[in-house]
Amino acid sequence: MDTEEWSMNAFIFFLLFQFCTSIDTIMPTKFITDGDILVSTGEKFALGFFSPGSSRDRYLGIWYNKISEQTPVWVANRETPLKNSNGGVVTINGDGNLVVFDRNQNSTVLWSTNVTNHHNDKDSIAKLLDSGNLVLIEAHSQRVLWQSFDYPADTFIPGMTLGQSKKMGMRWLLTSWKSRNDPARGNYWYALDPRGSPQFFVYKGLTPYWRSGPWIGKGLNGLPEMARPLVSNVSLVNHDGEVYITYSLFNDSILSRIILDETGSLHVLIWIKAINRWNSFGRAPRDRCDDYGHCGPYGRCTTNDVMECECLPGFEPKSLRDWNLRDWSAGCVRKRVQECGKGEGFLKLSREKVPDTLISLVDNSLNLKECKKKCLSNCSCKAYTNSDFNGGGIGCITWYGELMDIREFINGEQDLYVRVDSIEIANARKSKGFLGKKRNLAILVVAIVVGLFLLVSSGYCLLKKMIKKKGVTENQRNPDMSLFNLATSATSFGDSPGMGLLECR
Ligand SMILES: *[C@@H]1O[C@H](CO)[C@@H](O)[C@H](O)[C@H]1NC(C)=O
Ligand SMILES: *[C@@H]1O[C@H](CO)[C@@H](O)[C@H](O)[C@H]1NC(C)=O
Ligand SMILES: *[C@@H]1O[C@H](CO)[C@@H](O)[C@H](O)[C@H]1NC(C)=O
Ligand SMILES: *[C@@H]1O[C@H](CO)[C@@H](O)[C@H](O)[C@H]1NC(C)=O
Ligand SMILES: *[C@@H]1O[C@H](CO)[C@@H](O)[C@H](O)[C@H]1NC(C)=O
């Protein structure tokens, strides 16, 4: 912003402040009080004080300006509300920070942007952008000193990033609210784990609660819905210590947000104008199989409702008793000692959420065949698959260590190849062979049935001809009786399925 623009803005600000508070900028010495709102230039977002749910505490927040249901996307003083007071004030204070204070409570600062490393020019202004981002700008240089997008609450909206950047010293994560009435930090948070192949986790405290799975080129492996982008484009940036996902919309007139609710569920929501409601486009976790490590190490959660957990091929339940009591947490152990380099191979599992990639290595230059070779040549490699599922699959990801948190999807795309010993391979071949035998048996049965059918039908035709002849001769003696006989014998054949279709020549 040059000086001219700046003074122009100041002038406009001055004018607007006289009549209304529908402005998008806060300047030093100007105050926004409880009841006033700041509105972004395109009128998409508003900033002001609000009380969530049934709470009477006041919070400074940003919400959608044009929709009927007040939907906060960001909260400033989430840990330090104004207790039952309408004395809230937002301003730029003496050191150039945006601050919230309660003028009914001794004007002590409740919240501050808390930027210290900038010119002490005190010339900063705060502006609400049409993306929903509140930025604190050093007016003379236009440098962004602080932005609300860097400090997300429970909501991820287009334009934001989630992940981390070493270069910028930033980590962007979501933290749930305590409850619908309390935006203070709750038990759940959603953040990136950059180790291995990067994955996102919902954590409950310090424990992983749900795992997104790795990025598979067109979405996160654990969210198969995302691989078919219709309204939004989520993509991963991963280079030079920067790993984050971005989120944009194909049409900016759509309102879409992702939230981490107070129960630890992520929801993808889209505002439907016609019904004045947020519609869910997907959630995670969606079922018990999504709970992190539900089936324990080397277990696999399936879509079978009776016994949802099974062991990977070559493994058996660690404790059969617990397993049968549906306590799967101990997982599975090897059926026998696996000797490396003695005729091992891989069995394919389809439509999988692949194991925790903390213990994985990625090489995007290999194809699936080379990947198999790489895995086979290292005795500690337990599984492999493609790292990117664009164009039928490219790249290579290999696992070294305990395979954890595998599940089956109804509509996933990713396969997983699990290392097994020669006995398992032989068993798999045998069961394939058995299937082959079964097929032969089926063919034999069909042949017999068809043969029988032909035999019976020709017999039927023969019989019919005979009856006809007999009928004709008998007819001359007792016309009614022979007609009746002919009719019954014909229908009794004709009634059996298939026989009615027969025509005798
Ligand atoms: C208000 O501020 C004054 C001066 O800083 C202090 O003496 C007084 O104790 C404060 N009162 C309350 C209620 O915090
Ligand atoms: C501001 O930062 C300082 C030091 O980084 C910290 O001690 C203080 O709690 C912060 N204040 C607010 C209001 O965030
Ligand atoms: C999705 O967003 C990424 C990053 O902004 C961009 O490179 C890519 O072209 C976008 N894809 C589509 C289909 O718009
Ligand atoms: C975006 O959606 C609006 C409303 O449905 C529509 O009028 C507009 O043409 C769309 N814009 C684009 C670029 O598709
Ligand atoms: C197998 O792979 C692991 C993990 O990359 C590595 O530490 C180990 O040295 C490899 N072993 C061999 C024999 O290459």
Image (tube, rainbow, N blue to C red):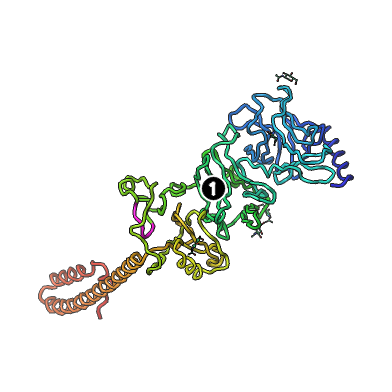
In terms of depth relative to the viewer, which is nearer, 338 or 201?
A: 338
Quadrant where the C terminus is found in the figure: bottom left
Provide residue 499's location: percent of width, then percent of height: 25, 71
Provide residue 470's location: percent of width, then percent of height: 13, 78
356 in magenta: no
Task: Looking at this view, name the residue that lies furthest to the bottom.
Answer: 505
Instruction: Judge whether 98 appears above or below 448 on screen.
Output: above
Q: How many marks?
A: 1
Residue flagged by tag 1: what amino acid is it? Phe
Instruction: Judge whether 271 appears above or below 226 on screen.
Output: above
Check disc 1: other Cα within 10 Å, few if <14, some if 14-19, many if 20+: many
In terms of depth relative to the viewer, which is nearer, 424 or 303?
A: 424
Left or right side of 364 for 428:
left
Q: Quadrant of residue 315?
A: bottom left
Left or right side of 228 for 441:
left
Task: Looking at this view, name the residue that lies furthest to the left.
Answer: 477
Provide residue 96's location: percent of width, then percent of height: 79, 36
Q: Quadrant of residue 119?
A: top right
Q: Quadrant of residue 133?
A: top right
What's the residue at 51%, 49% (across, down)? 211
Q: Visible in this render: residue 396?
A: yes
List the residue tagged with mark 1. Answer: 201
Range shown magenta:
312-317
Q: Visible in this render: residue 302?
A: no
Provide residue 465's location: percent of width, then percent of height: 18, 79
Task: Point out the quarter of the image occupied by ligand 4.
Answer: bottom right
Q: Which secondary structure lies at badge 1? A: strand
